[in-house]
Amino acid sequence: AQSVTQLGSHVSVSEGALVLLRCNYSSSVPPYLFWYVQYPNQGLQLLLKYTSAATLVKGINGFEAEFKKSETSFHLTKPSAHMSDAAEYFCAVTDQAGTALIFGKGTTLSVSS
Amino acid sequence: GAGVSQSPSNKVTEKGKDVELRCDPISGHTALYWYRQSLGQGLEFLIYFQGNSAPDKSGLPSDRFSAERTGGSVSTLTIQRTQQEDSAVYLCASSLSANTNYGYTFGSGTRLTVV
């Protein structure tokens, strides 16, 4: 069965520091993987997606993620955090039928000055 | 429209009442999804519509929940005899097709509070 595990429900970094949000997946078929961001009182916005092309995927706002099949991971990184990055981040994998997304429980990113 | 529109944005209802939540997807998007977001629980898949096909209702938590999509566009999620555990943010998303390669566009959600 498809599933996603996000390690760490809350991550805190200082402004300018590296952001690393962890996501591990389980999939019985080649996965499509996604990262979404949710700002307070808003819907989810697509950050980036992996759909079996390049394993290093670049997204919006300077974020990127690397698909590592051997580690079943799709961690999200950003070299230098900005205050505006404070939000909740969700990793998702396609279900077995390829028609719906299964989301992790989310990681809240806090950025301090 | 330009984005996915959900209404109302907030709804407070008394336990036992029925509620209807509306989603207006992006024009031309054939796939429509409903998710429930509860505190600390992430997003829980509820139901999915693709064109005129029968919906995938596998995520609906009980028979008090139902949804329809009229004319392949607007969708309504109905919760009958609401319970306090139904309190959550209900998110709607649409996609160009059922192929998740396209990703979803989400609405801002309806925050439901059952008192």
Image (cartoon, grey):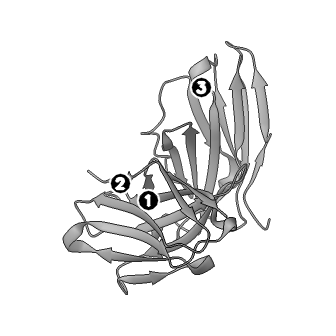
Judge whether B34 appears above or below B93 on screen: above
For this view, does B29 lie left or right of residue A32?
right
Mark closer to the chain start, 2 or 1: 2
- Rendered image: mark on residue A4: 2
Residue that numbered label 1 is attached to: A92
- Does residue B89 appear in this view? yes
Amino acid type indicated by mark 1:
Ala
- Does residue A32 appear in this view? no
For this view, does A96 lie left or right of residue B48?
left
Q: Residue furthest bottom?
A: A54
Q: Residues within 10 Å of mark 1 (few under 14, many from 20)?
A: many
Q: Residues within 10 Å of mark 3 (few under 14, many from 20)?
A: some
Which chain is home to disc 3?
B
Tell which of A74 and A10 is nearer to you: A10
Amino acid type indicated by mark 3:
Asp
Regarding mark 2 in the picture, which secondary structure is present there? strand
Which chain is home to disc 2?
A
Splitting the image into 4 quarters, where does residue B107 fall?
bottom right
